[in-house]
Amino acid sequence: MLAKTIRNWTVIVDGRSMAGLAEDVTLPELERATESLRNAGMLGPVETDLGLSGLSLSFTLTEFNEDVLRAWGLFGAGGIPVRFLAGARSDENDANTDAIEVAVRGRWKKISHGTAKLGEVAKMTVEVPCSYYRYRVNGETVIEIDLIAGTEIVDGIDRQADIRKAIGLVS
């Protein structure tokens, strides 16, 4: 069995395709915030789960894009939707192509225009802290995280539902 590799991709910013403009994208890392805990009676320390670390996405464009610049300073932690769409396929003869989508919402934290030099492409990099994250394959949601609503749905199960219920956020 051969691995499925991403054959091509694009980024869509607030409904506008960046195909032909996006040079790279760094997708959010999923990371748990933990702390080493060793209390009385324990043989050794364990990493206790303290929730999720922050989510962040960044992308680089090979132009100073006006639509991206116009979104600077938009109000709201989830004000701008950004989607990464990719096609992944293995080199096996009967391989199907998987449609991968990573959708986030956030706002621009940093826009870097880098260094402009004659004879080189000037680039713009955007950093986006994310309040929402969803990973889908072929239309099926694998992971969906909403940091503001406190939801963490993995394979259809909300792993934070009992916590929200315990603190009176849902009945």
Image: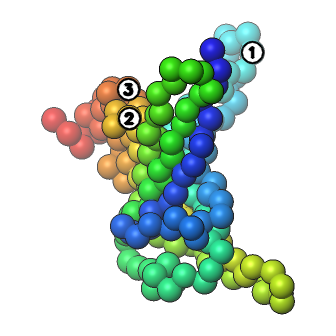
> Is the C-beta separation of discs 3 and 2 under 8 Å?
no
Residue 16 placement: quadrant: bottom left
In the rendered image, which quarter contains the C terminus? top left
State whether residue 60 appears in this view: yes
Amino acid of disc 2:
Asn
- Disc marking residue 44: 1
Q: Where is mark 2, residue-wise?
A: 138
Q: Give 108 or 53, whichever is nearer the viewer.
A: 108
Q: Earlier in the sequence, mark 1 or mark 3?
A: 1
Q: Quadrant of residue 62?
A: bottom right
Name which residue type carries label 1. Answer: Gly
The answer to whether residue 141 shows anywhere in this view is no
Q: Is disc 1 placed on a helix, strand or loop? A: loop
List x then y, in percent, for residue 43. Answer: 73, 10
Crowding near the residue tagged with mark 2, few <14, some 14–19, many ≥20 C-alpha atoms within 10 Å: few
- Which residue corresponds to the image point at 59% horizontal and 21% vertical from the top-left? 92
Secondary-structure class at tag 2: loop
In the rendered image, the quadrant that contains the N terminus is top right
Q: Is residue 51 above or below residue 84?
A: above
